[in-house]
Image (cartoon, rainbow, N blue to C red):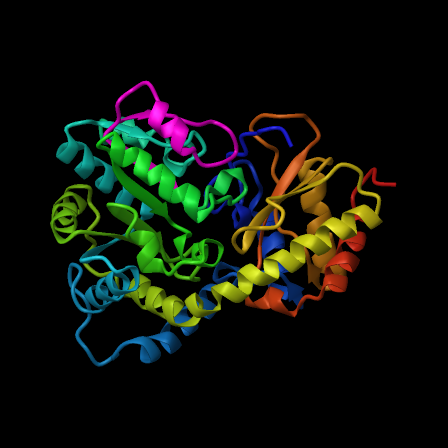
């Protein structure tokens, strides 16, 4: 498949895009909510009441509801920070309301410490695609791109890059390239190449939780390769919001100062912290099973598209390296989204969610992101193949 810039707005797989009518957005949500079979049942599919009830139920399981509520980051927020530092094997960790802010602060701290405000990262990395140029506009940083293909940079590309940089940022997995990862040996080599250049290494680990299966390493060993790591709580763990920046005690102490300057210390944050602790308890142990079943689903999709005569299609990467991957089809995004919604409404089976037109590439080609969680474990390969056939029957112009 040719390299295409997908540029999907973060979270857009389950939100209305600009220009979408509210009725259309609510119709999609209703279709996903009522589906009896779905590959991933997301917390945001539920109503406000559903989510409040779940949060109240989780609070008693993950902390002591009789304790005083958090004030400016203590209490249950402090519990969460200690829990994540322990899971990642780092000296300390600081909670942030968003991952965007956590990474802004991390990279700004490293710029000050290295004396070099240049950050090397992939052009499809989150700050380049989803943050409105904030690294430069807000934090005064400059970015360079040692690699451009739909993969992480190689050690040779880092070693031979002609410009100096103070920080190498690696997004694991690289979401907009299809949730792709290097091998463990490749990752070690890339980090070593950065060290040879006296650069520090920061991991954008928003989805680091599900990388352990692919690497065959525990989270502490993965995190130990980097000087700092950011992890998210809503992308893989079903949390409400929030992120943690983890690293040395001195870095985290400095990051807390910048967090306050960036406006990242709300008076109370207990809902996000409780949901994050619940996700660590409930979802983190299940992620290996999700990753394993994503491979079954992806293989069955390939079989289903072939049997149904879909023509050109791609499942990327094949096999998936996490519990998320992309599917590409040669039809319009609006037509495929309508067909996906109709399938859920008419059959009770939701195979795909929203489809998108790539930022660059051939016209008439669309892609979607597939996530396999607990609800998807019920699907057999035959269920997937049957659902593919039912979807394509609803695509206009598909004979």
Specify whether residue 35 is in view: no
Give the image location of residue 175, x and y in percent: 48, 43
Give the image location of residue 59, x and y in percent: 33, 75
Snapshot quadrant of residue 266: bottom left
Give the image location of residue 372, x and y in percent: 57, 59
Q: Quadrant of the C terminus?
A: top right
Give the image location of residue 271, x and y in percent: 31, 65
Residue 352 higher or lower than 273, as above or below: above
Instruction: Look at the image and give the residue range highlighted in magenta.
Output: 142-171
Residue 131 higher or lower than 51, as above or below: above
Residue at horizontal 59 percent and vertical 67 percent from the top:
375
Snapshot quadrant of residue 347: bottom right
Q: Is residue 161 magenta?
A: yes
Q: Residue furthest right?
A: 399
**In this rendering, position of residue 37 left or right of residue 115:** right
**In this rendering, position of residue 231 left or right of residue 139:** right
Residue 29 higher or lower than 136, as above or below: below
Q: Nearer the viewer, residue 24 or 74?
A: 74
Residue at horizontal 44 percent and vertical 67 percent from the top:
283
Residue at horizontal 42 percent and vertical 52 percent from the top:
207
**In this rendering, position of residue 232 left or right of residue 295:** left
Q: Nearer the viewer, residue 387 or 122?
A: 122
Q: Is residue 357 magenta?
A: no
């Amino acid at each position: 498949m040719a390299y295409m810039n997908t540029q999907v707005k973060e979270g857009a797989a389950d939100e209305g895009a600009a220009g979408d009518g509210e009725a259309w957005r609510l119709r999609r949500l209703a279709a996903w909510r009522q589906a009896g079979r779905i590959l991933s049942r997301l917390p945001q599919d539920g109503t406000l009441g559903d989510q409040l009830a779940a949060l109240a139920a989780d609070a008693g399981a993950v902390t002591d509801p009789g304790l005083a509520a958090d004030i400016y980051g203590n209490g249950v927020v402090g519990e969460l920070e200690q829990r994540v530092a322990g899971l990642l094997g780092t000296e300390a960790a600081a909670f942030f309301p968003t991952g965007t802010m956590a990474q802004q602060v991390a990279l700004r701290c490293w710029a000050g410490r290295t004396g070099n405000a240049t950050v090397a990262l992939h052009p499809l990395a989150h700050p380049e695609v989803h943050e409105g140029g904030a690294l430069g506009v807000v934090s005064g940083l400059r970015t360079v791109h040692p690699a451009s293909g739909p993969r992480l940079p190689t050690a040779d590309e880092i070693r031979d890059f002609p410009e100096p940089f103070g920080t190498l940022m690696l997004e694991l997995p690289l979401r907009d390239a299809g949730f792709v990862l290097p091998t463990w040996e490749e990752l070690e080599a890339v980090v070593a190449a950065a060290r040879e250049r006296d650069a520090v290494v920061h991991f954008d680990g928003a989805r680091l939780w599900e990388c352990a299966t692919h690497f065959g390493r525990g989270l502490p060993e993965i995190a130990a390769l980097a000087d700092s790591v950011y992890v998210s709580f809503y992308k893989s763990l079903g949390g409400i919001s929030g992120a943690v920046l983890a690293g040395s005690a001195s870095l985290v102490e400095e990051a807390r100062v910048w967090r306050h300057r960036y406006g990242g210390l709300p008076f109370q944050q207990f809902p996000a912290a409780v949901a994050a602790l619940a996700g660590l308890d409930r979802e983190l142990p299940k992620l290996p099973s999700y990753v394993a079943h994503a491979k079954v689903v992806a293989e069955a999709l390939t079989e289903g598209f072939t049997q149904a005569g879909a023509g050109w299609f791609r499942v990327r990467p094949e096999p998936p390296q996490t519990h998320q991957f992309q599917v590409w089809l040669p039809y319009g995004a609006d037509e495929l989204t309508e067909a996906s919604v109709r399938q859920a409404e008419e059959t009770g089976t939701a195979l795909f969610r929203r489809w998108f037109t790539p930022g660059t590439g051939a016209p008439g080609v669309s892609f979607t992101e597939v996530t396999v969680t607990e609800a998807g474990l019920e699907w057999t390969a035959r269920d997937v193949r049957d659902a593919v056939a039912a979807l394509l029957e609803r695509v206009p112009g598909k004979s």
